[in-house]
Image (cartoon, rainbow, N blue to C red):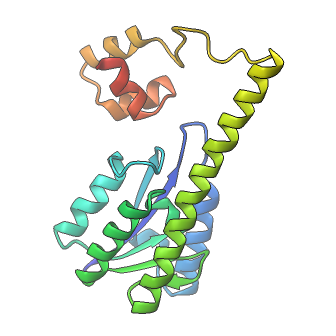
Amino acid sequence: MKKVACYVRVSTVGQNSASQKREITRWLNGNGISPESVVWFSDKESGDSLARPEFEKLRSAIFNGEVGTVIVWKLDRLSRKLRDGINTLCDWCESGLRVVSVTQQLDFSAATGKLVASVLFAVAEMEQETRRERQAAGIFAAKERGVYQGRKPGTTKAKPARAQALREKGLTHEEIATAMGVSRSTVIRYLG
């Protein structure tokens, strides 16, 4: 019997996925699925890339035929990029996988769901770009007023030397990220 997988994602280590898990659990209970019987995958990484540890584990489980349904809080948890999101969703649905977004109340397995998904992924990408444009405009305005300080040259979120020391102790990128309170991509950059 194939498993039901629930995937949640927040963009930073400081964010919390509890609200996503609560909504998914409510959906599971409402559909007669015990939350204890599902497999949870949870990332603390940006949706800009598909290279996220738990997402890769989920894709591997899907590829190995272990998962029959994927439940997400919102479709943009899979990806913030239109192309990546559409390709992933199409590949999954074509293989017979059921994909459900609980807050959007959509099952993407049917043709209508795929059409709606393309619009939702486009909106997610547009939101991401708009946020970056607003940030750049704010920085530009602050520079014009002479009040922009930005990040001081050479500053980091944590000490790169600590990342190296933890790596020498045999910790994985994910374990180092958790220990330091930074993202996996930051750890990779420190160790690069």
* Numbered disc total: 0
Q: Residue at the location (61% across, 56% down)? A: 127
Q: Is residue 145 above or below residue 85?
A: above
Q: Can you name the residue that lies furthest to the front here? A: 144
Q: 104 or 84, which is in the foreground? A: 84
Image location (x, y in percent) of residue 82: 44, 63
Q: 129 or 151, which is in the foreground? A: 129
Quarter of the image for the N terminus: give it.
bottom left
Q: Is residue 151 above or below residue 100?
A: above
Q: Can you name the residue that lies furthest to the right here? A: 145
Q: Residue at the location (22% across, 80% down)? A: 95
Image location (x, y in percent) of residue 39: 37, 65
Q: Residue at the location (33% across, 27% down)? A: 188
* 57 horizontally vs 82: left or right: left
Q: Residue at the location (51% across, 63% down)? A: 76
Quarter of the image for the C terminus: give it.
top left
* 100 horizontally vs 26: left or right: left
Q: 142 or 109, which is in the foreground? A: 142
Q: Can you name the residue that lies furthest to the bottom here? A: 111
Q: Is residue 190 above or below residue 50?
A: above
Q: Is residue 102 above or below residue 22?
A: below
Image location (x, y in percent) of residue 169: 26, 16
Q: 183 or 126, which is in the foreground? A: 126
Can residue 1 be seen? no
Can residue 91 be seen? yes
Which of the 4 quarters of the picture holds residue 145? Answer: top right
Image location (x, y in percent) of residue 68: 29, 79
Which of the 4 quarters of the picture holds residue 11? Answer: top right
